[in-house]
């Protein structure tokens, strides 16, 4: 015999207001960089990258000061991408999306 439990929860206005304020305090920043950095940037998986590539990626993240991206989408092949100071070659790229706190 299968029993289903249904819960009806009333949204707590205070919690909803706190979540809305937290979401509103962030802005999204989109930057382009090589596609092969995606696994390292989003998952922390540097397999397949050599030490110089990791250093270039880390230097780009440090220069931008945004932390780790939360998403990426295909941007295609680009000659001029946002990480060109650290990786000056044209590359297949992603648009990386960062969530960054608004400055007060």
Image: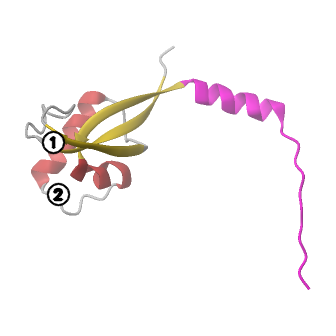
Q: Where residue 78 appears, x then y in whole percent?
A: 17, 38
Lateral position of residue 64 relative to residue 28, left or right: left
Query: Which residue is disc 2 drawn over?
Result: 49
At 76% from the left edge and 35% from the top edge, which residue is drawn? 15
Q: Reading the chain from its start, which is encountered first: label 2 or label 1?
A: 2
In the rendered image, which quarter is residue 57 located in? top left
Image point 30% across, 59% down: which residue?
Answer: 45
Judge left or right: residue 100 versus residue 78. right
Q: Residue furthest top?
A: 104
Q: Quadrant of residue 61?
A: top left
Q: Report the front residue among 11 and 78.
A: 78
The crowd level at tag 2 (other Cα within 10 Å; few <14, some 14-19, many 20+) is some
Q: Secondary structure at mark 1?
A: helix
Quadrant for the N terminus in the image? bottom right
Residue 72 drawn at (x, y percent): 37, 45
Above or below for 65 versus 93 = above
| Residue at image mark 1 | 56
**Residue contact between numbered discs 2 and 1, judged by CB atoms under 8 Å:** no
Q: Name the outermost residue toward the bottom.
A: 1
Percent x, y for residue 85?
Answer: 12, 31
**Of the pair 22 and 5, the residue shown nearer to us:** 5
Quadrant in the rendering for residue 59 = top left
Which residues are the magenta region?
Answer: 1-25
- Per the rendering, the mark at residue 28 is none
Q: Which residue shows up at 18% across the image and 49% down it?
A: 54
Q: Secondary structure at mark 2?
A: loop
Q: Position of residue 63 (x, y in %)?
A: 24, 29
Q: Nearer the viewer, residue 12 or 38?
A: 38
């Amino acid at each position: 015999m299968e029993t289903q439990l249904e819960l009806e929860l009333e949204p707590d206005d205070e919690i909803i207001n706190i979540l809305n304020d937290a979401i509103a305090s962030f802005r999204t920043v989109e930057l382009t960089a090589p596609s092969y950095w995606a696994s390292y940037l989003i998952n922390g998986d540097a397999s397949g990258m050599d030490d110089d590539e990791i250093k270039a990626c880390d230097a780009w993240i440090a220069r931008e000061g945004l932390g780790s991206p939360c998403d990426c989408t295909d941007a295609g092949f680009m000659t001029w991408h946002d990480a060109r100071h650290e990786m000056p070659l044209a590359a297949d790229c992603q648009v990386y999306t960062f969530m960054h706190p608004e400055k007060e």
